[in-house]
Amino acid sequence: MRLPKAVLFDLDGTLLESEHLWLRAEQRTMAHWDISWSPSDQQACLGGPLERVVAYMHELTVSANLAPQPTSQEISDALISNIVHLFSTTEIEWRPGAREIVLETHRLGIPTAIVTASWRVLLDAVLEIMCDHVGNFTISVAGDEVAHSKPDPYPYLEASRLLRVGIEFCLAIEDSPTGTASAVSAGAPTVAVEHLAPISVPGAVVMNSLHGRSLEELWLLARSVEGRSERILNE
């Protein structure tokens, strides 16, 4: 097999240059309660489900002894409102090489999935914009639709089930340690594009960009790794 039977893409930081939007949304959310939010706070939540981000934020509000104390639901609603607004009013920006890989996958007629920790309300808003650029993805799996979120293997196994393609024949492309662990533990040959956080997950090929890579190259590299990690950095 020189090509995968399906390609499973993470969203934020993998396909889209969106982590800066998340940082702004998180900062705006916390600023509502006069609490600062730094890039280190963002990195502590990188790749995790929205529930983990909200729990982290809620803990900050508890530590600040706010009165009245906001509920997790109030924090969640504010964060979703802020990020949906930013995505809706900011021009979409693709990660280097990501758009080209999606277009190549579609051109070859290979099924695709978005597998993200973001909730469906946000994913649908982003997908509408993305599909204008690259066409439709076959399926998508949102973070609030799975029994267990990343780093659990469930999201990738669910995508494999929905596509009716064995996970071993699916190429997963990720950018965070959490998401990479999810894909690898599911059994998918995995390419991790290191972005905001270092990645060292046995079973994944780690590179710093998709720029100039072909789908066949990514698939062959991902399948060549057996229980070890390999770093392949672009010049």
Image: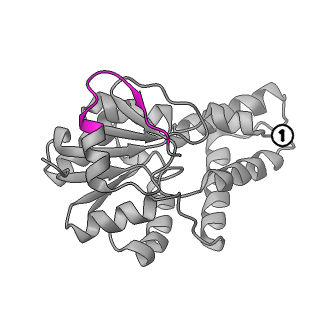
Q: Is residue 207 left or right of residue 90?
A: left
Is residue 224 one of those drawn in magenta?
yes
Q: Looking at the magenta stretch, what is its main secondary structure?
A: loop
Q: How many marks?
A: 1
In the displayed image of the protein, which residue is found farthest to the front? Answer: 235
The residue range painted magenta reads 222-233
* Snapshot quadrant of residue 17: bottom right
* Snapshot quadrant of residue 102: bottom left
Q: Does dot 1 land on a helix, a strand or a loop?
A: loop
Q: Is residue 118 left or right of residue 34?
A: left
Q: Residues within 10 Å of mark 1 (few under 14, many from 20)?
A: some
Residue 66: x and y in percent read 84, 34
Looking at the image, residue 216 lies above or below residue 38: below
| Residue on which the image places disc 1 | 36
Q: Residue at x 20, y 50 (%)?
A: 4
Residue 188: x and y in percent read 26, 37
Q: Residue at x 50, y 67 (%)?
A: 125
Q: Is residue 139 left or right of residue 144?
A: left
Q: Is residue 43 left or right of residue 10?
A: right
Residue 209: x and y in percent read 50, 48
Q: Is residue 62 visible?
A: yes
Q: Nearer the viewer, residue 74 or 201?
A: 201
Badge 1 amino acid? Ser
Looking at the image, residue 93 lies above or below residue 59: below
Residue 206: x and y in percent read 44, 35
